[in-house]
């Protein structure tokens, strides 16, 4: 009887200790392992993380005017969102987390929907200039940021081989300086809504699509083409019939996934600037592994993500290019592909 009572007493003490320890952890979240400490795979590519794995996401607005090509740093981006800046002229929002180039640019002005995406992913936002709506959002402090309007010639440097506004660049070192200046966090906060297969072999689709074309309006300079490589399992990108390469390394942009999301657009001023609905979802196409799949997209915490029947659709490990095209004329008119 005494042995039984002793054993019960020991169990009660251990239970009390465990409960106390749990309460301490709950009340002191700083003592818990953070996502940064257990991040082993890139949250935006699904690939093995590159140390330091806990670096904060950076989003930079990159110029896509023909006078700004070839750009610098696009080949290192985990994801690139291509969206209309005005009329049929597109601009890139490049997302970096797994790896960072030494130089990024040419940097261009912000739009409100670029700011929305940066805020949704808790990214440090980099731009040079802003639309009126974007300026209001930035001055309200909804996202940590640095802008070339205030730092032209210091944090942002102008190249001599191009003319403004197609010649503003920022280095990785200066982005670090900007984070310090703005007292911004430098660690990843764990907000990626994207899911990935373990390998590209798991991402094979039934219907083949080895060549993809995405059009914005009638200006062929802003048409994008993708060609799938059966050996690399990657899509090589070109724009206006010219390969999209890095100005410094001459490397061609290659991605594992091409997504096309259809969203409502509305012209808001005489400059042709757009209001783009990134909240209500719509039709979408997914290209991966040399195939195509008709899906949908929805908003997850403000970020557009691929879905099917309300569930997330996985991406092939690697980089992703995301086109946001106007609902009018829509995907059927904007996208074509061949086996």
Image (tube, grey):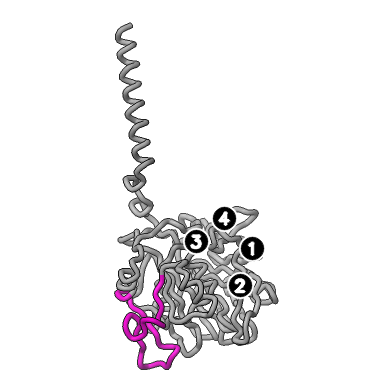
Local crowd size for mark 1, using a 10 Å CA cut-off: few (<14), some (14–19), many (≥20): few
| Circles 3 and 1: CB atoms closer than 8 Å | no
User: In the displayed structure, would residue 242 be above or below residue 199?
Assistant: below
CA gap, disc 3 and disc 2: 27 Å
N-terminal label among 3 and 1: 1
Residue at coordinates 64% horizontally, 80% vertically from top-left? 267
Residue at numbered disc 1: 280
Nearer the observer: mark 3 or 1; the answer is 1
CA gap, disc 4 and disc 2: 22 Å
Considering the numbered disc 4 on the image, is that residue within a helix, a strand or a loop? strand
Relative to 7, 295 lies left or right: right
Relative to 278, 333 lies left or right: right
- Which percent across, then down, holds residue 311? 60, 53
CA gap, disc 4 and disc 3: 13 Å
Q: Nearer the viewer, residue 293 or 88?
A: 88
N-terminal label among 3 and 2: 2
Residue at numbered disc 4: 312
Considering the numbered disc 3 on the image, is that residue within a helix, a strand or a loop? loop
């Amino acid at each position: 009887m005494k042995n039984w009572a002793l054993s019960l007493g020991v169990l009660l003490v251990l239970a009390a200790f465990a409960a106390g320890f749990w309460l301490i952890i709950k009340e002191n979240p700083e003592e818990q392992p953070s996502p940064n400490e257990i991040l082993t795979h890139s949250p935006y590519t699904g690939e093995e993380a590159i140390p330091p794995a806990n670096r904060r996401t950076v989003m930079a607005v990159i110029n896509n005017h023909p006078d700004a090509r070839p750009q610098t740093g696009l080949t290192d981006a985990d994801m690139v969102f291509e969206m209309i800046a005005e009329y049929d002229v597109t601009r890139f929002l490049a997302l970096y987390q797994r790896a960072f180039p030494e130089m990024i640019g040419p940097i261009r002005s912000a739009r409100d929907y670029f700011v929305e995406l940066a805020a949704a992913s808790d990214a440090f936002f980099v731009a040079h200039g802003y639309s009126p709506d974007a300026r209001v959002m930035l001055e309200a402090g909804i996202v940590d940021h640095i802008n070339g309007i205030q730092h032209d010639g210091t944090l942002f440097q102008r190249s001599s081989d191009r003319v403004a506004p197609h010649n503003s660049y920022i280095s990785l070192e200066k982005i670090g300086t900007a984070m310090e200046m703005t007292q911004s966090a430098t660690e990843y906060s764990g907000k990626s809504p994207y899911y990935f297969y373990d390998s590209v072999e798991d991402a094979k689709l039934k219907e083949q699509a080895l060549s993809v074309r995405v059009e914005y309006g009638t200006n062929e300079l802003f048409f994008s083409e993708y060609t799938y490589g059966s050996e690399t399992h990657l899509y090589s990108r070109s724009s206006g019939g010219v390969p999209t390469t890095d100005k410094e390394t001459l490397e061609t942009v290659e991605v594992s996934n091409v997504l096309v999301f259809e969203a409502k657009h509305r012209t808001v001023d005489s400059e042709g600037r757009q209001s783009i609905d990134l909240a209500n979802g719509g039709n979408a196409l997914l290209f991966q592994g040399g195939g195509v799949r008709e899906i949908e997209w929805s908003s997850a915490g403000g970020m557009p993500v691929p879905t099917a029947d309300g569930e997330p659709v996985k991406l092939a490990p690697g980089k992703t290019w995301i086109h946001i095209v106007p609902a009018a004329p829509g995907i059927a008119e904007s996208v074509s592909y061949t086996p």
